[in-house]
Image (tube, rainbow, N blue to C red):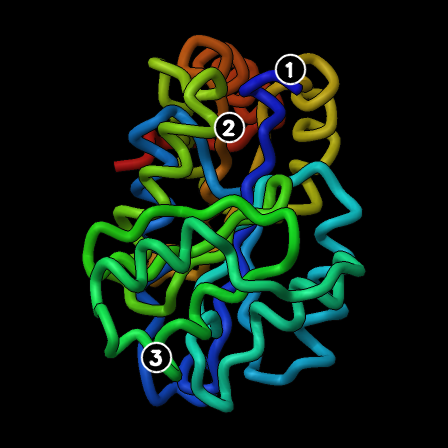
Amino acid sequence: MTSEHLRIGLLIIGDEIISGKRQDRHFPKAIEIAGTRGLSVTWSMYLPDEPQTITDVLQSTMARDDVVFSFGGIGATPDDHTRQCAARAAGVELALHPEAKREIEAQFGADAYPRRIEMGVFPEGSRIIPNAYNRIPGFSMGRHHFLPGFPSMARTMMEWVFDHEYLDRQRESVPVDIAIIVKDAGESQLIDLMNDCLRRFPACKVFSLSTLTAEGRRIELGARGEAALAEEALAFLKQGVSSLGFDWDLRP
């Protein structure tokens, strides 16, 4: 799999997010972290603290080749289910990871027992993700990486995963998102043009966002991908829009 086709997914777990009690900070930070490495987030899902739902989703994502970062639910309180669900989804048992045991004991000594040590119980075959904040690690299974729900911890741990497991997937060229604003056109009138653009530039994504303004209908029409290719795709769209008889401006 080349870096151009690396799919990155996010699972953000917690009833407090679903209920709106807390605002999610993982999604924007993950976009930033991936973006600085020339990568982008492909998809994201919010999940409740519900074991069956978490297990079902993990079984689905583990069957694909996506790189998945899961945030939350790896603590030891009764509402933390992610470690158990990951093991169930993978069909393996849970066990105290020896490296996690050393890290937690080094941080807390005798106070690691009887509860803190439980946070080092991972699905068998896991690899630890170091946690510089308090030495309670996260864990990886294949291309799934399980991080705590605390954004300040998860951020550095996600960076560590990218730079230790996917360094060869990173790119110096960051994908760009460029567009024009088409005036007084309906999206249906641009569909054929968009499909033609996709056929000519299959490595790009073509998008449209329609809005109604005081001046009339406006459509943000653009391309997302490697800079040089996206510029070519946008030039094709500009020419096509003009050929259809619609005016356009560059997106501010």
Residue in the picture at 55% in, 41% down: 8
- Any part of residue 3 in sight: yes
Residue 113 shows which numbered tag? 3
Closer to us: 112 or 135: 112
State the CA–CA distance, disc 1 to disc 2: 10 Å
Label 2 packing within 10 angstroms: few (<14), some (14-19), many (20+): many
Quadrant (top left, top right, bottom left, bottom right) of the N terminus? top right
Is 85 situated above or below 186?
below
Where's the C terminus, which quadrant?
top left
Callout 2 secondary element: strand
Residue at 40% across, 33% down: 162
User: Relative to residue 131, is residue 168 depicted above or below?
Assistant: above
Count of labels in the image: 3
- Residue 33: horizontal and vertical position, in percent? 32, 40
Which of the 4 image quadrants contains residue 199? top right
Cα distance between the residues tagged 2 and 3:
54 Å
Q: Residues within 10 Å of mark 3 (few under 14, many from 20)?
A: few
Mark 2 / mark 3, whichever is N-terminal = 3
> In the rendered image, which residue does mark 2 sit on?
223
Which residue type does callout 3 highlight? Tyr
* First of labels 1, 2 by sequence position: 1
* Residue 208 in sight in this render: no
Badge number at residue 201: 1
Camera-side mark, 3 or 1: 3
